[in-house]
Amino acid sequence: MEILKVSSTSSPKSVAGAIAAVARNDKSVEIQTIGAGAVNQAVKSIAIARGYVAPNGIELVCVPAFSQSEVEGELKTSIKFLVEKR
């Protein structure tokens, strides 16, 4: 499984391209985010990626979940998105 870390300054189109590339190779991708801005960019990226792969008959599904991430020695609550091909 591929892991992508998305921040509030990530380009949604670039992240969407990475998601689409992974989906075309029959793999799953986990997107990790910390903060509202990062979640926003990740959701936009997933929506754009769906548009990229839909013409090829690929449908993407997204499952959000909470997780814990260590940042600079401190535990932070993060949101991860598991994106799979259906």
Image: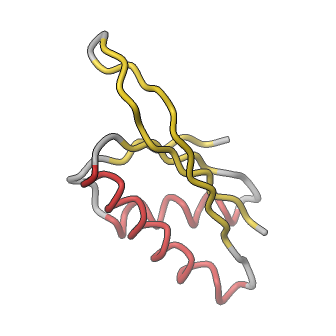
Residue 16's spot in the image, x, y percent? 45, 66
| Residue shown at the point (49%, 58%) measured from the top left | 18
Q: In which quadrant will I find the C terminus? A: bottom right
Nearest the viewer among 9 and 78 is 78
In the displayed orientation, state which residue is furthest to the bottom: 55
Residue 71's spot in the image, x, y percent? 31, 21
On screen, residue 59 above or below 57 = above
Quarter where residue 21 is shown = bottom right
Nearest the viewer among 20 and 59 is 59
On screen, residue 13 above or below 67 = below
Looking at the image, residue 45 sits to the left or right of residue 24; the answer is left
Looking at the image, residue 32 sits to the left or right of residue 26; the answer is left
On screen, residue 70 above or below 39 = above
Looking at the image, residue 26 sits to the left or right of residue 33; the answer is right
Nearest the viewer among 7 and 57 is 7
Total number of numbered discs in the rendering: 0
Residue 47's spot in the image, x, y percent? 48, 75
| Residue shown at the point (37%, 18%) measured from the top left | 75
**Applied colour scheme:** secondary structure
| Residue shown at the point (47%, 26%) measured from the top left | 68
Looking at the image, residue 9 sits to the left or right of residue 4; the answer is left
In the displayed orientation, state which residue is furthest to the top: 73
Residue 56's spot in the image, x, y percent? 70, 84
Q: In which quadrant will I find the N terminus? A: top right
